[in-house]
Image (spheres, helix red, strand yellow):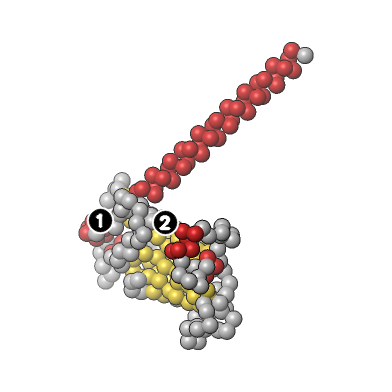
Amino acid sequence: MPPSISKRIKTLSVSRPVIYGNTAKKMGSVKPPNAPAEHTHLWTIFVRGPQNEDISYIIKKVVFKLHDTYPNPLRSIEAPPFELTETGWGEFDINIKIYFVEEANEKLLNFYHRLRLHPYANPAPSTDNENENNPPGRNAKDAEVSSVFFDEIVFNEPNEEFFKILMSRPGNVLPSNKTDDCVYSKQLEQEEIDKIDIGIEKVDREINELKQKLESLVKEEATQ
């Protein structure tokens, strides 16, 4: 008999933060074994906690669907770290499916990530300080490319058994301040909110200025 599922807790939601995306770096003359000659980059795609926490207590496995030109394009990662490293030369959409542990009794999470191998634009010229921080012979085009996104998995009305599992690891929350190891933080969240508020104020100000100009034009036409 299948195991009985405990009842769900009404009107309750529990969220857990995750980051997903990929890093990539151009390969030199030395390439991994069996890498095709036309491949130019080494890349890694992943799903993990914001501070590299073990999230296998909620995630059973992650399946990455690569481009059909890859051998065995459906790659299932069934133990942490939930990541996959490959080589390639082109960018494409990777389908990501997250399967939750049996106790969760939740549907899989299905979404896409665009594999990024190249910077979006040419970087600005380096300053003297930046040159001091770069090793000799290294420039911006050789740097690692990173395309990483933050999101929260929300479990609406989790069952009682899974709720206990979620509460057993309440620690994977965003840190207060940004660090080199974890950019995503409450500090970054507040900075983004502040930027949005500044943008809204700017738009409101421009709208008011346009309204005043329009009113002035209407008054001028009325007096003619």
Given residues 175 and 173, the one toward you in this image is: 175
Nearest the viewer among 25 and 85 is: 25
- In the image, what residue occupies the spot 50% across and 83% down? 31
| Label placed on residue 170 | 1
Position of residue 210 in the picture relative to residue 201 (left or right): right
- Quarter of the image that includes the C terminus: top right
Q: Position of residue 151 (x, y in %)?
A: 41, 55
Specify few, some or many for label 2: CA neighbours under 10 Å numbering under 14, 14-19, or 20 or more: few
Q: Residue at x 27, y 51 (%)?
A: 9
**Whether label 1 touches label 2, CB < 8 Å:** no
Residue type at mark 2: give it.
Phe
Is residue 104 positioned above or below 205 on the image?
below
Foreground: disc 1 or disc 2: 2
Q: Position of residue 180 (x, y in %)?
A: 36, 59
Label 1 and label 2: CA atoms lie apart by 18 Å
Tell me if residue 24 can be seen.
Answer: no
Say what secondary structure mark 2 lies in: strand
- Say which element carries label 1: loop
User: Percent from the top left, x then y, of residue 186?
Assistant: 35, 48
The one nearer the camera, 147 or 29, is: 29
Q: Residue at x 37, y 70 (%)?
A: 82
Mark 1 and mark 2 lie on one chain; the one further toward the N terminus is: 2
Please determine whether, in this image, residue 100 is positioned above or below residue 74.
Answer: above
**Is 53 situated above or below 197?**
below
- The label shown at residue 150 is 2
Q: Quadrant of the N terminus?
A: bottom left
